[in-house]
Amino acid sequence: MDQDDIGIGSFAYAVGEQECKPADIAGFDALWQSVSPNTDFAAMGCETYRRMPGPALPYVADTVRHTLADAGVSPAEVSHIVFATSDPTLARLPHDFAIRVIDAVGLTGCVPHLLSFQRCCSSQTALRHGRQLFTDPRVRNVLVVALDFTPDDRDRVRNYALFSDGAASCLLTRGTPGLVRLVASSIHVDEGGLRGRDSILSRKKVADKALAAVLETSGRRLDQITKVFTANLYQPLMLFNSAAAGIAPDRVHYVETLAAYGHCGNTDWMINLADYHQKTGIVAGQTYLAQAPAQGFHACSLLEGSA
């Protein structure tokens, strides 16, 4: 997998245009206490969330257009588009969603793919799948698109995250350095978690497996990772997960996006990478970790800066 000729870049994202506060959700205090009794939501680090007032299609089309414009690639030059979403969002999408996106953007001759059933880890599998499509030497450009949204505000309040609405995309291109390249990728399953019987121990075990796999494959060490881009779970969980993995809290980029957007499902790690690059900058040769914890799964993608 460690090949230099496939660059990943032009990350873009669009979150729901309506900015809302948790208190705007009808019966929020009761909902919060029902999922997390005797805890103070103010300590969770999530100040607002974003709502899509209408269909997700315009958001997806918008982020794809931004990705292609940034890369200087025309829609006709894209061979494949790989969509990733969580199981609940998949059930909400119209059956012809991929065709609607292709038509809206003008992706003539583009083959659609779908990755799901891995909850918020699906987008990392989509990235790996997109990379594998380059085994066909005729493929030049592959889009990866992640999206998640929650129509009913009452369903947003969970004991691990406040759900928000968003879409994100990036472009994989042959022969172009891009922003990063994929060095190693791994996803592991927590069988108890799949059935709602996960525990602190089982979540740590599956996270350790996924992280160990990408470090072993890449031949790199944990202390070589410059920054981690992960899911926007509540801040106490983020701090616990970082400590359990041996990662210093200041190496995980999420605080500002968590406060502003909450948890946008499969898009989180892409949003955090894009936000970090805009504010600080991905550095060529440095190692970065994209990480996705989800109930029943844990995914890691080790990236090397090529900007």
Image: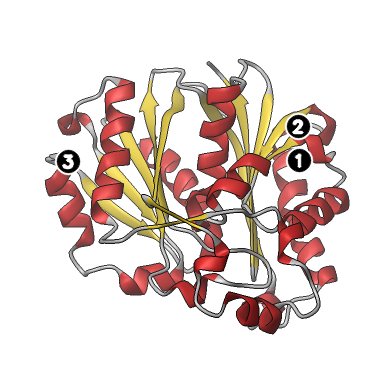
CB within 8 Å, label 3 to label 1: no
Task: Report how far apart the C-alphas of labels 1 and 2 lie in the structure.
Answer: 5 Å
Residue bearing the label numbered 2: 219
Disc number placed over residue 216 in the picture, else none: 1
- Residue 105's tag is 3
**Marks 1 and 2 close (CB-CB < 8 Å):** yes
Sequence-earlier tag: 3 or 2: 3
Q: Position of residue 151 (x, y in %)?
A: 38, 70
Residue at horizontal 68%, vertical 21%? 286
Mark closest to the chain's N terminus, 3 or 1: 3
Query: Residue at (30%, 48%) from the top-left corner?
Result: 60
Q: How crowded is mark 2: few (under 14 residues within 10 Å), some or many (20 or more)?
A: few
Q: Gap in Å between the C-alphas at discs 3 and 1?
A: 40 Å
Above or below 229: residue 210: below
Q: Which residue is painted at 35% across and 58% down in the image?
A: 52
Q: What quarter of the picture does the N terminus occupy? A: top right
Q: Nearer the viewer, mark 3 or mark 1?
A: 3
Q: Is residue 14 above or below residue 22?
A: above
What residue is at 35 percent from the left and 53 percent from the top? 83
The three-letter code of the residue at mark 1 reads Glu
